Amino acid sequence: MATPKKPAAAAKKSVAKPKAAAAKPATAKATAAKTAVTKAKPNPGKVETEVKTKMKTEFANMKDKATDRAREAAESGKDKASEALGGFGKILRDSAGQIDEKVGAQYGDYARKAADAVDDLAGKMDAKQVDDILEDTRQFIRKSPGVAIGAAAAIGFVLARLVRSGRD
């Protein structure tokens, strides 16, 4: 009986060897597949860096566009304010003659001086760039913060009244 066991054991060994040989190519294929997936899968650090760079570029572009639009709006506002001040100075100067007749020459002179001051302000505003006006405003606020807060409150009040009157 011992003799039949040996060929069976030998048969098991010979059968086991082909299985091991067949398992190695499958493992090699699995390793190759994993390597291919790893190569195809992008590096998370690289993708994150690319996304950050792209976002920074987009934000910079948006900031530049917003800055350009704000500058254009400020230039337009400066031109309109300068024009309005010029018109107001003209009205004051034209009214000075009537003030002379109705109230007195002294008050007419006040109106002329006020017209000159308004015209001077309009001329200065016309001559300056928006950046210069902003810098002058910053310096004024640093020197007189109380006056700046009061002026802002007064302007806010006037604008609120104008908006309310426009709704009615």
Image (spheres, grey):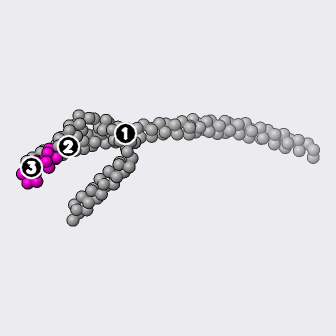
Q: Position of residue 151 (x, y in %)?
A: 32, 51
Q: Position of residue 79 (x, y in %)?
A: 21, 41
Q: Residue at x 30, y 57 (%)?
A: 157
Main secondary-structure element of the magenta-colored stretch: helix
Name the residue carrying label 2.
Answer: 118
**Kind of residue at disc 1:** Gln
Report crowding for label 3: few under 14, some 14 to 19, many 20 or more residues within 10 A (C-alpha).
some
49 displayed left or right of 108: right
**Kind of residue at disc 2:** Val
Q: Earlier in the sequence, mark 2 or mark 1?
A: 2
Question: In whole angstroms, how far apart are the C-alphas of marks 3 and 1?
Answer: 39 Å
Q: What segment is highlighted magenta in the picture?
A: 99-112
Q: Position of residue 105 (x, y in %)?
A: 10, 48
Question: In whole angstroms, how far apart are the C-alphas of marks 2 and 3?
Answer: 19 Å
Name the residue carrying label 3.
Answer: 100
Report crowding for label 1: few under 14, some 14 to 19, many 20 or more residues within 10 A (C-alpha).
few
Name the residue carrying label 1.
Answer: 139
Verify CB contact (< 8 Å) between mark 3 and mark 1: no
| Front residue of this view, candidates 45 and 92 | 92
Dividing the picture into quadrants, the one containing residue 109 is top left
Q: Nearer the viewer, mark 2 or mark 3?
A: 3
Question: In whole angstroms, how far apart are the C-alphas of marks 2 and 1?
Answer: 21 Å
**Camera sees residue 137:** yes
| Dot label at residue 128 | none
Q: Earlier in the sequence, mark 2 or mark 3?
A: 3
